[in-house]
Image: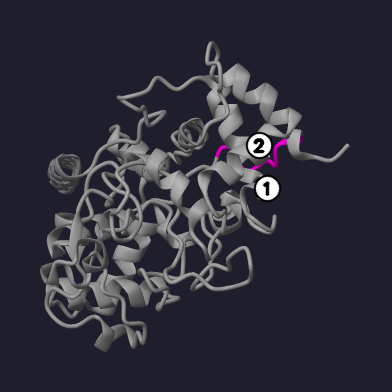
Amino acid sequence: MKKKYFIVMALFIIAFAISCNQRDSKETDQTSARAKQAEDSLLRVARSYFKVLPAIAYDSNHAITPTEIKLGKVLFYDTRLSKMGNNSCNSCHNLATYGVDNKVNSTGDAGKQGERNSPTVFNAALQNMQFWDGRAKDVEEQAGMPILNPVEMAIPHKGFLVDRLKSIKLYQDMFKTAFPGEANPITYENLQKAIGAFERTLLTPSKFDKYMQGNTDALTAEEKAGLGVFIASGCGTCHNGVGIGGGIMQKFGLVTDYRTLTNSKIKDEGRQKVTKNKGDKDVFKVAGLRNIAGTYPYFHDGSIASLDSAVKIMGKAQLNKNLSNEEIREIVSFLNSLSGDINPDAKTFPSELVKK
């Protein structure tokens, strides 16, 4: 009897164990299925807000060529594009530091300070307007403006720079190659086209793009949590599209005067200075957030040095939300995932400008 009893108990234990394993396996499968469903849902929502970075930002009005890009890079780094020879485009938009100089205001050719924080040139060609006040429609138009700005590069007029470039053998050859068939290739318009062509190559794909392409393992759990908070909080209403911003103009301080949060002292009218329309007061371009972790200080006046603080201020000023420390940490984690890869060639000083 005892032997039979032990056999029955052994069979019962084995059956119970099998049942538990099956139940555990089923619960594990259900948990995995729910996790997969959540992953798919987040990716689907993200794709409704954002787009994958292209390989190049093409110009629909002008077919850019490799020779234009090469010329544009040389021009971008050449200090002879400023009156006194102290500044190049790269001085304020340093390609080695995510396209900015990390200063509150940039220093101009004669040592004076600019009025606004210099935005990054990386991925700028994908934006719908240029400058904080949106006064230029594309990077080609934008490229010609700082050169003539009396503080920034201080060239007195277009003809002054054209004559200077015409006297340089390097540019005689490079403009002729970049714009073949033109009787007079060294023009201010062609200079703008060349710099714009180069800037259209300044794109920085990140692991977020891999995530958007379907690799859900490209982001960490905290980065994905931050993406979810970013969207749920309403940040994606303005910061969307391929640049995660840069698509629209918006009033800074929809809920409250931003100056009470940033302690800004500068009286900047924003787009009103361009349009003279009172309704455009404090209206600025919505910043693109790609590489945002490296493009400090933040906002048009460079008033905030910390990304955590910038997120907190945006939550209150734009969304009337008091984001918790955990929400801020998760959003910042997501924003860090937007830091992309810079093409080493872009940040390499052109050999053409090296004095032999």
Q: Residue 165 carries which label?
A: 2
Give the total number of marks visible in the rendering: 2
Instruction: Give the image quarter of residue 324.
Output: bottom left
Is label 1 in contact with label 2 (beta carbons under 8 Å)? yes
Instruction: Give the image quarter of residue 23.
Output: top left
- Magenta stretch prevailing secondary structure: loop
**Residue 151 coordinates in the image, percent (x, y):** 53, 66
- Taking the view exactly as shown, the residue that stands out farthest to the right is 356
Q: Residue 119 carries which label?
A: none
Q: Tell me, yes or no, whether the highlighted magenta stretch contains residue 26.
A: no
**Residue 256 coordinates in the image, percent (x, y):** 15, 82
| 192 over 42 or under it: above or below | above
Q: Taking the image as drawn, is residue 106 in sight?
A: yes
Q: Which residue is drawn at 36% across and 27% down?
A: 58
| 59 over 246 or under it: above or below | above
Task: Name the kind of residue labelled 2 in the image.
Answer: Leu
Q: Residues within 10 Å of mark 2 (few under 14, many from 20)?
A: many
**Residue 342 coordinates in the image, percent (x, y):** 54, 42
Q: What element carries label 2?
A: helix
Mark 1 or mark 2: name the one nearer the start of the chain: 1
| 290 over 304 or under it: above or below | above
Q: Residue 80 carries which label?
A: 1
Q: Which residue is drawn at 63% across and 68% down?
A: 110
Range of magenta residues:
343-351
Q: How crowded is mark 1: few (under 14 residues within 10 Å), some or many (20 or more)?
A: some
Q: Nearer the viewer, residue 262 or 236?
A: 262
